Image (cartoon, rainbow, N blue to C red):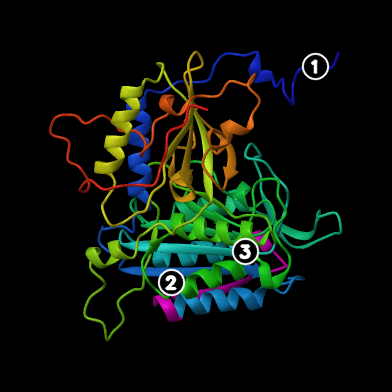
Amino acid sequence: MSPPFGGTKPSNAYGRRRQKQNLKDFAKNLENAISGVIPSHKKPYGQVAVLGMHWENDEMGVAGLERELLGVFRKKYNFYTESYPIPVQASAAGLSNKLSTFSQKWAAPDALRVYVYSGHAEAADPRATQYHLAGRADAQGCLVGPRVDWYRASYIVENAGPQGGGDVLYIFDCCSAGAAATYDGPEFLAAAAWDATAGSAINTSFTRTLIDELNVLNGAPQTIASVFASMFRNVTQSQSDAPPVHIIKKGTDSITLAKLAGPKQKKLESFETRKRKGKFPVSENRVLLSVQLEDDVTFPDLEQWKAWLTTNIPSGIFDVDITIESFFTGSKLLLVTVPLEVWTMLPANEDAYAFVAHVSSNNVLPNFSSAFPPGLTLPQPSQRMSGSENQPFSSPGKRHMGPSRGHRSSHSTG
């Protein structure tokens, strides 16, 4: 008999149950995630500088796309941009010197530094101690020729200037790009996951999709989390390339990209103007999560969840669809769908949550109950609840984030 380590009998089916969370904490995490996706109301950046990096011996022709992307940042957003070809000779030293001078020059408490890389990278997983970049690779995807270890180089970026040297954003278009992100590092937008191959076709590449998205925004304030979600939807709908990856910096809101005030502009857009531009797009793309709770879920709990969603989500900002799809007694398990924007902002180290699947609908099984034979038991409509989701149970003096309003959502027990 083969060992029960996969398929229907993974090893965790025989192990200890994962960490549990109460419904209040889950709702609070959702509230923080939603808040983190809203274009920031904090003081706008005083300066934004973007460094594009590609290899001197680039064989894929990425320099042209990099140039176009930097042009969008410069013309649409008034950002300072600079391009750097990583040299073939003394690659590590050359890149380190460039990162040091650029980072020291632009590090400031009110600054945003953006580092864009286009090229080859080695396959790696989150536990790797090195992550190498190179200008060339063989037919099997193995790096060929000079290379640099990004983990070592990134230390220069993240320790530039005095404490409080501003925000940092990484944008990587390469294979296994997600490996360049560490959990406690800066916010990261990547072309592919740790073990995935990035698209090589120029017209459907990650950088092309990002350029198109930024051109549509035309300098309007938008968080990186929302940019990621829009790119993810476009890529999955076209089924052309690997979907992008977004990793938020621990304990922070997503970075907001917004046009800097030019010499002829008296002031930037007000926060109220930004809010009107911050709606989630109407979309069928959602993420199905399982949530392990401390206690059994009851119908009164779900009523409180519904009340929370209609009072704690900012009115007029998001059309949010957060739905309890099913819940199970005994296991204390909830199945919940959330928008991509909310999913990417949830804590990455919360063991009570588990990704299940990307989905394009709510639970449809109850709609087909009449099609099943009499021997198959399904919940009756009277057992199900309709309406929105679940609430972090209001506490005295809690300030609601917006007036009550309706949301498209449902509760199912099937």
Q: Which residues are magenta?
A: 75-94
Q: Does residue 55 appear in this view? A: no
Given the image, on which type of amino acid does mark 1 rest?
Pro
Given the image, on which type of amino acid does mark 3 rest?
Phe
Q: Position of residue 212 (x, y in %)?
A: 54, 72
Query: Mark 2 or mark 3, which is nearer to you?
Result: 2
Q: Position of residue 406 (x, y in %)?
A: 30, 47
Of callouts 1 and 2, the N-terminal one: 1
Residue sitting at 53 percent across and 20 percent down? 18
Residue 3 got which mark?
Answer: 1
The residues bearing labels 2 and 3 have C-alpha atoms spaced at a distance of: 17 Å
Which of 193/353 is in front? Answer: 353
| Element type where label 3 sits in the image | helix
Q: Position of residue 44 (x, y in %)?
A: 29, 64
Which of 171/97 is in front? Answer: 171
| Element type where label 2 sits in the image | helix
Furthest residue toward left: 397
Query: Where is residue 276, by image quadrant?
Result: bottom left
Is residue 286 one of those drawn in magenta? no
Query: Where is residue 197, by image quadrant?
Result: bottom right
Which of 412/378 is in front? Answer: 378
Q: In this picture, is 290 found above or below 221? A: above
Residue 206 got which mark?
Answer: 3
Q: Quadrant of the N terminus?
A: top right
